[in-house]
Amino acid sequence: MKGEVIMKPTFQGSLVALVTPFRDGKVDEPRLRELVEFHVANGTDAIIPCGTTGESPTLSHDEHKRVVEIVIEAARRRVPVVAGTGSNSTAEAIDLTAHARKAGAAGALVVNPYYNKPTQEGLYRHFRAIAEAVDIPILVYNIQSRTAVNVETDTLARLAKIPNIVGVKEASGSLDQMTQVILACGPDFSVLSGDDNLTLPLMAVGGRGVVSVVANIVPRDTAEMTHAALEGDWKRARDLFHRLFPLCRAMFIETNPIPVKEAMAMLGMIAPEFRLPLCRLADANRERLKTILQQFGLLKA
């Protein structure tokens, strides 16, 4: 789909990496709609379905598209929806991105191709092909720990020159690399943390916010922390970040999204259901998680 490029939005603040609730092996559509309402009511700045936290690798293509459609329908333009549309096949990523555009998404989050380990030139051509095929704002999702390849700073700087590639979810875990990206790509390119425990350090050097896992359970706290930083109220931002920090770390005591879905189940938000190869949290870690939720005040002791 080619045409006039949509004006560059500024994706910033708290963008939730939304879980996909399941019940009896199927997507729990009523509960998914409830989660969207929860985020609208609690100030989340954008909702991202079908990312890593949404268990996209085990969604069929039909399910993937249906989840995107439901979230967009439920959001009713009250909050932007940035659909996860990445794939290690460029043609497949274009198809998913075109669907998101047609369904009314405000943007697309596109992960760097996994398993086939492209070169930096291959990465550049992959993202450029998607951006040229679909006139929708695109966030690159750089996460070497899951894909075996790092989108290097020089590559991102090249991509930032493409009008509808508007930012990056940086999950490299390296504040040094993220700072390099901010300097190389300029102030109009949104650099978002892909790790909740690095949100405030990244924002201190010019990042615009976070694609958050912990916001699935504490959306208002996460949004308030990022908004305080964007407004330059660093004391309030730091106080909120310090309070959130143990909870952020708890979300990764096992592979994401296992801990966050277990936490949501403890809070009565969803059923504790996963698709293999993901499975329930180990008993010892479940007790650790329960204690941290109690300390935060989300569960009664």
Image (cartoon, grey):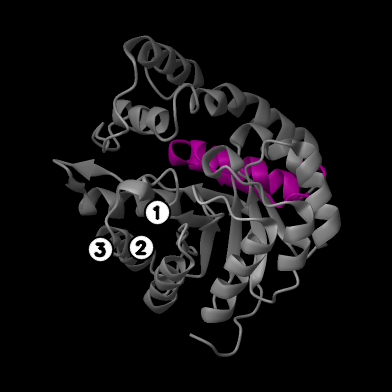
**Identity, as a three-letter code, of the amino acid under mark 2:** Val
> What's the mark number on residue 50?
1
| Residue 136 in which image quadrant | bottom right
Give the camera-side residue of 244 and 144: 144
**Identity, as a three-letter code, of the amino acid under mark 1:** Cys
Q: Secondary structure at mark 1?
A: loop
Residue 2 rendering spot, x and y as whole percentages? 53, 87
Q: Which residue is mark 3?
A: 62
In the image, residue 88 sits, relative to residue 226, either above or below, namely below
| Residue 290 in which image quadrant | top left
Q: CA distance from mark 2 to mark 3?
A: 10 Å
> What's the mark number on residue 300?
none
The nearer-to-camera label among 2 and 3 is: 3
Q: CA distance from mark 2 to mark 1?
A: 7 Å
Image point (54%, 72%), residue name = 130
Residue 121 rendering spot, x and y as whole percentages? 68, 63
Q: Secondary structure at mark 3?
A: helix
In the shown orientation, is residue 230 left or right of residue 278? Answer: right
Whether residue 10 can be seen here: no
Residue occupying the far left of the picture: 24
> What's the mark number on residue 68?
2
Crowd band around label 2 with a 10 angstrom C-alpha radius: few (<14), some (14–19), many (20+): many
Residue 12 rendering spot, x and y as whole percentages? 65, 56
Quadrant showing the C terminus: top left
Residue span colored magenta = 203-231
In the image, residue 83 sits, relative to residue 249, either above or below, namely below
Q: Secondary structure at mark 2?
A: helix
**Identity, as a three-letter code, of the amino acid under mark 3:** Asp
Give the camera-side residue of 180 and 221: 180
